[in-house]
Each structure stands twice: as structure tokens, then as C-alpha cells.
Image: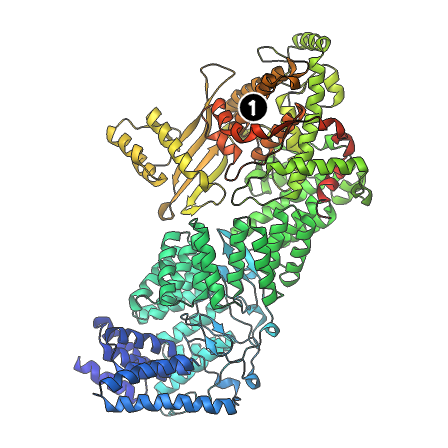
Amino acid sequence: MSSERAELARLCSARNWSKAIRLLDSILARSPSSIHDLCNRAFCYSHLELHKHVVKDCDRALQLEPALLQAYVLKGKALSALDKKEDALLVWKQGYEIAVRDTTDLKQLLELEELVSSVKICEATESADHVIDASPCDTKVVISEDRVVDKSLTATTMADTKTVVCEEAIGNSKVSSNGDTKLPNQNNKVENNKVSSSPVKDSTGTQAPKKAPKQDKKNKAKVVKETNGRADDVTDRSSSDESETILLDQTLFATKISKSSKSISLDFRLSRGIAQVNEGRYDQAISIFDQILRETPTYPEALIGRGTAYAFQRELDSAISDFTKAIQSNPSAGEAWKRRGQARAALGEFKEAIEDLTKALEFEPNSPDILHERGIVNFKFKDYNSALEDLSTCVKRDKKNSSAHTYLGLTLSALGEYKRAEDEHLIGIKYDESLLDCWAHLAQLYLDLASPEKLLNCLEKAIQIDSRFAKAYHLRGILYHGMGRHRSAIKELSIALTYESSSIECLYLRASCHHAIGEYKAAIKDYDDVLDLELDSMDKFVLQCLAFYQKEMALYIASKANLEFSQFNIDDDIDPLFKEYWCKRLHPKNVAEKVYRQPPLRISLRSGRLSKQDFKFTKHQTTLLLAADSIGKKIQYNCRGFLPNQRQYRMAGLAAIEIAQKVSKAWRFLRNPKNIAKLVRRRDKLNMSQNRGGYCSTSTLSGSPTSSPNEDRVFSGISLSWQDVYNIAVKWRQISEPCDPVVWVNKLSEEFNSGFGSHTPMLLGQAKVVRYYPYYQRVLETAKTIMLDLKYVNNAEDRAIFLTDIEKLKKIEVASSCSDLYHIVGETYWVATRCDSLAFQGRRLEGTRITTQNMGKTGFDFAIRTPCTPSRWEEYHEEMAAAWEAICEAYCNDTNPTRDPGTLDAVKDAILRMTYYWYNFMPLSRGSAVVGYIVLLGLFLAANMDVTTSIPPDVQVDWEAILSPDPDAFVEAIKPWLYPSIKISRCLKDYTDVSCAFGTTGSVVAALTSVDP
């Protein structure tokens, strides 16, 4: 120990502060509670102007000994150097008061008294002369230090200057209390692997570096941030938006440099290298560090400095290599562990990043900086419980850390704590209203919760702060798209693209909007631009794959623009393999080689294109559109996460009216006794029906679920099948949002034989899915009931796992989570909900599968999955046919059913029963929920009954069907709120025929688009 003390004295005498610090590191590793060594290390840090490290060591010393006057002196000086004059004065006053009460150290008492007095004198002087004349080369910025900003120092303004490691810099001479700046991590990076030049904080909570005056072009890039598991772009901001100056220090090392001292020269060059990094001159900084490392290859500080420069250049592998060498040279270098963790996070190596940051915490226990960083990495790793713990601890120790608050908000949102999440975002904004990440994250929360008014207000404030904030326009575009206002969305996305021209998310969404409103030329151009981009992430590659399929679909629809809407038939016209790959978002290489491609746009548009005339509506068309809007709005789920969508309302209303018109014509035909006899004879002759007899045919001549019946077919004696009825709604759903792959599952490729399954999660890892988690408890209880009833479950290979053990059954009874059930079973499993048949007594159909899948540390995937195998399809086809026949019989048995309340009740129940089987069937790749309710509304209209109520809050009709064991249970669940609202109405006869009013595909697109002129 005495030899160590002698060596420490020698190093300090030689002004070799770096080596002295390393020696003190080893001493403190053995004796972490040595308050004098903590002060000694703080003293050494102060000579290297590593002021934040000074503050940390002094804080640790004061926790151990609150009356340690030397710590107050050093901490106050460090805060003063960081331009935190008020905080420095407060610290010195605290120390002075302690010294007065206990005058055992008169020297320290007098020093504190002088320091307090000097601050007061300095404040008086500054009020008279506030301009400092200095040179940029003397910039006082060092590794691990906060950037000191003073907007009043206009004489020394340096455009777009940034620090290496500052956590955040706030104007008006105030510096955030966040810790050291984080290296750019995964969400700093964007296309071309460039680091951000934006002063906006990136999604890791790090102040994104600004562009330096002479910074290389390659250092300029965008910041990407991910909100609730999705990746979104954040725009660059120009330096003109926020003028900042760097507080300069003309005395940097002036009293410390000795030309004959190699160690001092080394420290000076180290400081120069750090300054170059801080100013964005990464190549120059690397050159300086290279010189140092040629002389001293294992010099930890130089390795950390060079690694930091590499990290800002997105050369993350080189950065990690340097940080690793620094750790090998000095395993106690907590800074190296922290920075390597940040760099690994930037590469998406979250597990390794968390390990490094955890190691860094051993050297700086409860450091808010490291807790902040690890909390964000845990969030990225989707370990939200760990993120919650880290970020909660961070904000307790660093209450004004806006970035930590907003990431705590994101974490709480993922965990379903939406009110607390909103509060945390607002706290972050309270402490830093200019931090755009806070506004963007709060806006994302409102988008997830489907609160458009709050979202728009939030984005407007963000744009007031920075009119070039592309993320705000992008989010507004997403909102308008989700509300069916595609033209408005295009305007917002175009603004975003003026600031971030290579944003694939904005390009893809704008292409989708052009596509939906019939601007096919613009859509194709945007899709081509998406396909031409070079990407650096799998999420973005998926968008490129989708752009390939969407472009083909845009060309297909363009070719149908001036043809009858009946000729728009995706299910029969588009190759099954194409649809399979489109639905599954697979790489299009196989499709491109094997599937016939759509002709180019110039050929596709030969048949015509949307014209201005398509958007000029007659009086009858306008009346029809108004009626459709009124009817269609009843499809709205009044639950979290479901935005109101005017375009979808109109689509649903027009589809419901068309269904009602076609079905009512069929029923009028069937109520004529002569036609009934004719129909029965024709059916017997053709042997078309597979049912037990009755009024309605259950299949069309083609046998296709996608045929488009017309009036001639109806009156020729062939009635509507259930598939024909539902396909009317399917086609409207397909054209209303053509970028959604809505197709009949049995029209996919031969892989259909192995089953195509939908997947709707309630719990995804630890994240609670905002739309569907409200049904979690009911689904859990349903699963428990099935397990106790059957006493077995199926594993991932569909093999039975028996649960006959009494102890296991008792545990199932008291299980309170999907995690409990998983641990009882011991592996991934599924159970099928009950769905009793009406068509075949005693038959039980396979309903929906409730699945629990282990996702490791991040939790469980608890979801419902609906397989669609050929055998299951056949069973439900028979059930749907019987249910449809029952509706027709209930209505057509009476020539005037509206006069008999009993007949109408039977019709109502029959409609709900068929709806029940549709929702358990789920025969579409997506969109089954809205299609089912549209048909329900249309059938009530056909029976001269108008549904006048909206779906009650927190009710999702498809989930009610899935969780009902039989159709009668579903009827009992729905009719209390549905039946009282039903009014007898003959309004259907007042509407012009939908298929005549909007006869062409182009006119249909125009009708839907006109909701947002």
C-alpha cells in the first residue's frame, strides 16, 4: 500500500493525471468507501477537466461522509466549470454552513468563504460585461463532459457544434443533469449507416450530434426512432433553427503544460483529440489518437476517444474493438464498458450491450446515466419490466432527465399503463419543451390509443418548435391515412419527404395513399423509389417486398378503372402464389420468376383512367353517399386503438346497401310460389345443392366464393349463396384499402392444404396489445375451462399433452396468467375454443386456437390463431350454408314478415347465428371482422330493419363470437344492445341501385375518395 501511495505522489508531481486516475481506480476497487481517495480521484479528474466525473466522485464521497469539506470544494468548482453557477453556489454554501458549525478545518472554511464571495462578485461583473473573446480551438469540451451552452455568447457562435459524450445540452447557459452522452445506438442509425447530424435527441435518449463546421459529408444522416415495436424516421434540423454557442476557456491547460513532460504532452494531445471529436472532426481526432496509440498502444483514454470517434462515423466494429482493448488494458475503466455497451446496442446486439452496461454499473453503482442507457437498451430488447426498473430508478436520481421520462413513458405504454405513460411524457416535456423526441413519443401514444385530437395538438406544438421536424409530418400522415383522409395524408407525407427524401416509411405510405385514390402513376413512381432504396434493416426490407406486390396490384386496378366493378376480381384474376407471398410478406424472387406480371402502366391505363367526371356526383348518387355514411359509421369499434375512418364508413355503407338490394331482390323472387317451384325443380335437375333442401342454393354455378351475382342470375332461378353475399362486402373492402391483402384463404396457393393461419396477439412478450389485451382475462378463463374439461392440450407439433395429474389440474384452477399455464404444461401449447354445430346435431367444430408460446426472457406470445385447412373449410362451408338457408326460410315463409314481430325475431336470431359462424370461420386473410358486421347490417336492411345504434364501448363483436361456445350464447350476448335499436324501415326503396350508380371501378374509387376532397 505504501508503494502505491508513493507511486501516486510521483504521478501527481509529474502531472500524469491519467495514470494517477488508473492507480486510484485500482485502489478504490479494493476500498470503494475510501472517501479521501474518491476526492483524490476527483482532484485528478479536475485537472483533465473531466468535470462530470468530478461531480460523481464527490457525490459518492458525500454519501459516505456528508461533512467532507474537500468534496464540496471540488464539486462546486466542477459545477462552475460546467457553467452551473447556481448549483455550484448552492454546493459551496452547503459546505460553508457545515464548516461554520464545525470549524475543525479553518483552511477549507476560508476557501469555501472565498468561493461563495467570488461567485457573487462574478455575477455582478457579468451583468456589466457578458462577452468573452476566445478562439474556437480553446473549446472547453472533454470526454464524458456535458456541452456547456451559452446563447448569449454570440461573438463566439459555432454553427452545428456537438460533443462526444454529453447527454443533452440545453440553451440559456443551463446544462442537463443527464450523464455522459451515449454513443449512437440502433435507433441513431439509418440508411447508409450514417450518424445523425440532428440536434434532436435520438431514440436512445442521446443528444444527436450536430454537424460540425468542417464535418465530412459522410457524417450527416438522419435519426431513426422506434415507437411501440415500430421504426420511424426523425428529421435533421438545420443549425439556423437553434443558434447555440460554446462557452470557451482561454486557460485550457495553460497552467498545466510542461514541454519537457511527456505525460503532460500526452494529456494535452488527448484533450486536443477529444476536442476534435466534440467539433465533429472525426478524421482529425482519429489521427491524433493514432499518434498517441503508436507511442502507447494500450493507453485506455486514447482508445476510448478513438472508439468514440469511430462510433460517430458508424464504424461500430472498429469502435467496439477499441473499447475492448481499453477494457483489456484497464478492466476497471467503467467508461469503456459503458461505451462498448452503447456501440453494441447500436448494432442491435442487445444482450451483449446489457451485459456491458451492467458491468459499467459495478464501477458507478446507481449511475443515472448508465441506468438511463441500460433502460433504453432493455426497451429495445423488449424487456419492458427491466426497462421499467432501470428508468424508474434513473428518474428518481435525475428528476429532470427528459429523455429518461419519455422512455419511461414508452415502456409504460408497452406494459398497458397508458395514463402513467402520458404523465411521464408530459413530465419530460415539462423539463425540456424543446426536446422533440418527447413530443414524438407522446404523439405516438395518442396514435396508438386512437386519440386524433390530442395527437394533432401534440404535433402542432412540435412543428412550432421546429417546422422542419419530418417525424411530425410523418405521424400526421399516418393519422390521416388511418382516418381515411388519403389526400390529406399525401400532403403531410410530401412535406416530410422534403426534409427526409429517402424515408422509406414515408415513400411507401404515400404510394399507398396515391394507390387508394386512383392516382396510379404517382403510386407507381413512389413504389419504384421504394424498390430503388438501399436499406440497412429487415423492417425496411419488408416494406420493399410489399412495394413489389403493391405495384403489381396498382397496375391491376389501373387496368380495371373504366371497366365494370364486377370485373374487379382479385381472388380469381391474381395468381394464387402471388397472393400467398403477398399475404405472408415473403421475398418476391420466387413470384417474379413464376408468376405472370402485370403490364406496364401505359398499357394498364389504355382502358381509361379516373377522370374529373368520376368525382362529379348526381343528386341520386349524393343521396346514396349520405345514406352510406350514416349506415357505415355503425361499424366503428369504440375501443382503444380503433381510429374513426370516414372512408371505411362509406365503404361499409355502400356495401351494406348493395347487399340489401341484391338480397331483397332474391327474397322477393323466392316468396313467389311459382318461382319457388321453378327453383326447386331446377336445383333438383342440376343437383347443385349439398343441403337438406330449402329455399336457397348454397353454391353458385361456378362453385366459386367470388362470383358476382347479378339480377339476371337471380331471376333465372339461381339464387345467392352465402359466399356471394359476403363477397360483395369483400370486394368493397379490397378496393377501399387496396394495400391490405384481403383475399379468400381458399383461393391461395396449394400451400393452403397445409393451412393458412391468422394470428391475433393479446400479449406479445411483455407488451400488452392495445386493441386486444382487454379480452386477455376472458380468453385466459376460457383456456382454463377447456383444459379442465378436456384434460389435455396440443403442443406445437399437434401432439396431445395429457393433464390428468390432480396437482396439475388444481394449479390450472388457480392460474392467474398465461405464464402460469405455460409452466404447468411445460412447453408451447394450444387449445381450441368450442363451436357447436347447428347444421349437424352433436358435431363440434374447431373454433379458434388459444396459443401460448414462450419467447424467452421477454415473456410469452398469448394469442388467438385461426387455421384454415381444407377440411375445416368444408365443415364451416356446410355450417354457413345451413345458417344462410335458415335466414332465407325465416324471412320468406311469410309473404309480409314485417307485420309479424315473431317472424322478425326469428330473422334477427338467424342473422346473428350466421354471423357467429362467420367470425369463428375467419375465411379471409384479413378483414373478416368488418366484413362480418357489414353483412349483418346489409341483411337487416334487406329485411326492412334498420340498426340505429353503434357498437357499445369496449365491445368487439368478433371476439364475442369467438368466446361464445355456441350461436345461442352469442345471440344472448349481442341482442341486449342490438335488438332495442332496430327500427322497421323501408328506406331501401329510396336508394338508387348501387351497382348502377357506381358501375365502374373508377367510379367506386372516386366515391370512396370524395370523403376527403
Q: Position of residue 903 (x, y in %)?
A: 60, 17
Nearest the eye: 195 or 285: 195
Please tell me which residue is depicted at 41% across the width and 41% down the height of the picture.
861
Does the image show residue 324? no
* Side (left or right) of 958 relative to 768: right
Q: Position of residue 275 (x, y in %)?
A: 47, 79
Q: Amino acid at mark 1?
A: Met
Please tell me which residue is depicted at 64% across the width and 10% down the height of the picture.
687
Q: Position of residue 528 (x, y in %)?
A: 67, 50
Q: Does 896 appear above or below 185?
A: above
Quadrant in which the N terminus appears: bottom left
Residue 56 image-quadrant placement: bottom left
Nearest the eye: 102 or 306: 102
- Residue hosting label 1: 914
Total labels: the figure holds 1
Q: Residues within 10 Å of mark 1 (few under 14, many from 20)?
A: many
Nearest the eye: 39 or 400: 400
